[in-house]
Image (tube, rainbow, N blue to C red):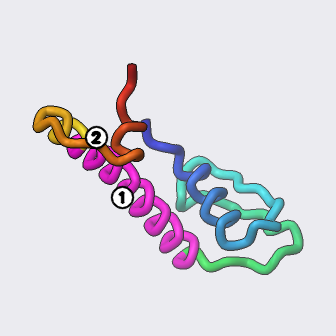
Amino acid sequence: MEKHISIKYVEAIQSINPNWSGSITGNTEDEFVIDWNGEAEISKSDIQAKISEMETAEANAVQAKIDLKASAKAKLIAGEPLTEDEANTIVL
């Protein structure tokens, strides 16, 4: 299930500025009103770039896990030793 866009905005803002303690109101990205709570404002384009960066990193992590499992399976079938990371992918 995909995260709600306001949650992504909050995570992106906090990634850029970990001290931010404001809030976001509104139902859609166009309606968002960000309470910066005295912190320096971050541009919408910077927030969207951070969201994109975070989504790419998440997708890469998922793909890396898939690749590691496939490698472990291929090595098991071939009777080859697994790396520790490959062994950790096996659920018993």
Residue at (70% x, 52% y) in the render: 25
Where, by quadrant of the figure, is residue 35 drawn?
bottom right
Residues 37 and 58: in front is: 58
Inter-mark Cα distance, 1 to 2: 14 Å
Residue at (44% x, 42% y) in the render: 2
Residues 69 and 1: in front is: 69
Which residue in the structure is indicated by mark 1? Answer: 60
Q: Are marks 1 and 2 in contact (CB under 8 Å)?
A: no
Residues 24 and 71: in front is: 71
In the image, which residues are magenta?
Answer: 45-71
Quadrant the C terminus occupies: top left
Which residue in the structure is indicated by mark 2? Answer: 69
Pointer 1 or 2: first along the chain:
1
Q: Is residue 18 above or below residue 87?
A: below
Residue at (19% x, 34% y) in the render: 76
In the rendered image, residue 8, in percent from the top left (x then y), is placed at 56, 54
Per the rendering, the mark at residue 41 is none
Q: Main secondary structure of the magenta part?
A: helix
Query: Crowdedness of circle 1 by 10 Å Cα count: few (<14), some, many (20+)?
Result: few
Query: Crowdedness of circle 2 by 10 Å Cα count: few (<14), some, many (20+)?
Result: some
In the rendered image, residue 34, in percent from the top left (x then y), is placed at 72, 63
Where, by quadrant of the figure, is residue 90 drawn?
top left
In the rendered image, residue 78, in percent from the top left (x then y), is placed at 11, 38
Residue at (43% x, 35% y) in the render: 1
Is residue 86 left or right of 20 when viewed as pictured?
A: left
Q: What amino acid is found at the position of numbered circle 1 in the picture?
A: Asn
Under circle 2, the secondary element is helix
Q: What amino acid is found at the position of numbered circle 2 in the picture?
A: Lys
Q: Is residue 71 above or below residue 37?
A: above
